[in-house]
Each structure stands twice: as C-alpha cells, then as structure tokens.
Amino acid sequence: MRRKIVAGNWKMNGDAELVRDVAAQAADAISGAELVVCPPYTLLSAAANHLPTGVGLGAQNVSEYSSGAYTGEVSAAMLLEMGCRYVIVGHSERRALFGEDSPRVAAKFSAAKEAGLIPILCVGETLAERDAQRTEVVVAEQVGAVFEAVGSHAFSAAVIAYEPVWAIGTGRTATPEQAQSVHACIRQRVAEHDADSAASLPILYGGSVKPDNAEQIFAQEDIDGGLIGGASLNAEGFLKIHRAVVGG
Ligand code: PGA
C-alpha cells in the first residue's frame, strides 16, 4: 500500500498563531495518512517545537548548493537540522515568478535527497499548455529532468505533486478524472525507469483542494493525497481535508 499524505503549503502566509492552531488540531489527527506542514522558513522552528510528533515538517524551497557564499539561500542540511523531513521543490510559483527551470529544480531535488530530505516535486501545466493538449509532454519534461540529474532511482524516497497551474488559487479544480489521468501518466513515466519506486510513490494532487471537494479527488486510484495551499491556512479545514484522504 502506498503512503497517503496531506501537506499544507502556507506559501508566504501564516504566523505563530496559525502554528499553534494547527498544532492543537493535529493532536487529534487520525492515523492512516501522514500530515505535513510547510510553513515559511521563519516559522519552521516554532512549528518544530509545537507540532505533535508524527506530523511532518517541510520547507517550501531549498538551495541547490550545500554551503558557501550564496546570500539569502538555505541549504538542505540546514533544513534537516531544523527538523524538516520534507521540502517542496519546483512549485509553479517558483518556476514562473523566480525563474526556476527544470534543470535547476532537478538540482534542488538532488541536493534535498542527498541530504536525506524527502523532496516533494511539483509538476503541472498552464492553461495554454492544457488547451494545446501538451499536458503530458510538459509533465514528462519536468519529471524527466529529475531522472536526468539523479538517475533511475530518483523517486525511490520522494513525492510528486501534480498541480495544474490553472487550478492553483483559482477556485477551479481539475475534475477527479482529469487529475487521475495525469497521475496515472506520471506513475507510468516513473515505472519506465523503476517499477518499484513507481508502485510506492505517493502522487499528490494540488490546486484548489477544499474540505468539500477533497474526498472526491482523493477517491481516485492514483491520487495519494493532496498539497493544499489556501485551505491549509485554516487549521480546522486543513484537518478535515486530512480526514478525507483516509475516507477516500
Ligand atoms: P491552492 O494552492 O490550494 O491554494 O490552490 C495549492 C498549491 O499551490 O500548492
């Protein structure tokens, strides 16, 4: 059985109060699915101190370099020391707004893995790419760059999040069928390199997942949980989404 995961991506939001709220709600989190919180760097320490054991902590970005004169960057080893188990790499906002192309994202993925973090690789197409029927090509390129940098066992201890760019923060979700079809295609791509890691790879869906649509999405065969943006900023709603993954 594949691990199920619900991860909250706070982006540049949240404060100490949200850390305490999530920590309080997470104390009663049901088992059977991992709960992961990815706050901004500045809240990692508070989150590490307050979150109950068993809740995973993740960062939203990591440097591809291990140390040195890289002002403003944070290395994978530093995140690990902070108590992180996960790190998001290649979120579409980083690709689109901060110029991170697939080779750079792959270098970050590699740095995270080498340090012992579990990378959550985000992939997904824009609306123009979907309309041009290029979804599978785009996602295959994003996944392929990681295989090229890390080798055929790249996804042996990793997570992929499929996040169609047009569904992020828009209130517009991919239909469960649309998402399932891309998830299956991603798993197939990974299987072409390594059948074992494809079989155990958690593939999360992200893009306007809310407490009221989560169960339907999570019920799909190849959807192993979610990466939640806006709805993770409300502790109660976030935990409802977490419960939905076990029902699904
Ligand atoms: P959203 O964001 O849930 O607010 O659409 C998801 C994400 O960007 O990871």
Image: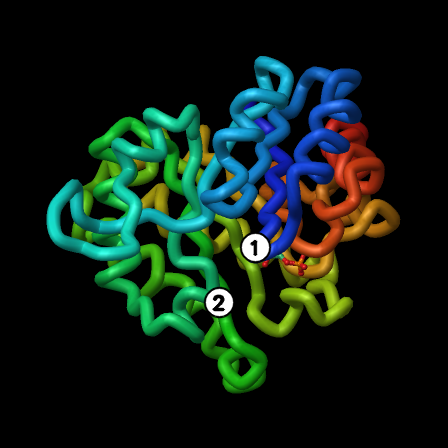
- Residue 227, given in percent of the width and then of the height, sits at 60, 47
- Residue 244, given in percent of the width and then of the height, sits at 79, 35
Residue ID for mark 2: 93
Q: In this rendered view, identify the residue nearer to me: 246 or 10.
A: 10
Q: Considering the numbered disc 2 on the image, is that residue within a helix, a strand or a loop?
A: helix
The quadrant of the image that shows the C terminus is top right
Circle 1 packing at 10 Å, graded few (<14), some (14-19), many (20+), is some
The mark closer to the camera, 1 or 2, is 1
The quadrant of the image that shows the N terminus is top right
Residue 187 in view: no
- Residue 226, given in percent of the width and then of the height, sits at 63, 44
Whether the residues at callouts 1 and 2 have beta carbons within 8 Å, the answer is yes
> How has the structure been colored for display?
rainbow
- Residue 130, given in percent of the width and then of the height, sits at 55, 78
**In the drawing, does residue 182 fall left or right of residue 8?**
left
- Asked if ligand 1 lies within 8 A of label 2, the reply is yes
Q: Looking at the image, is mark 1 or mark 2 earlier in the sequence?
A: 1
**In the drawing, does residue 15 fall left or right of residue 194?**
right
Residue ID for mark 1: 11
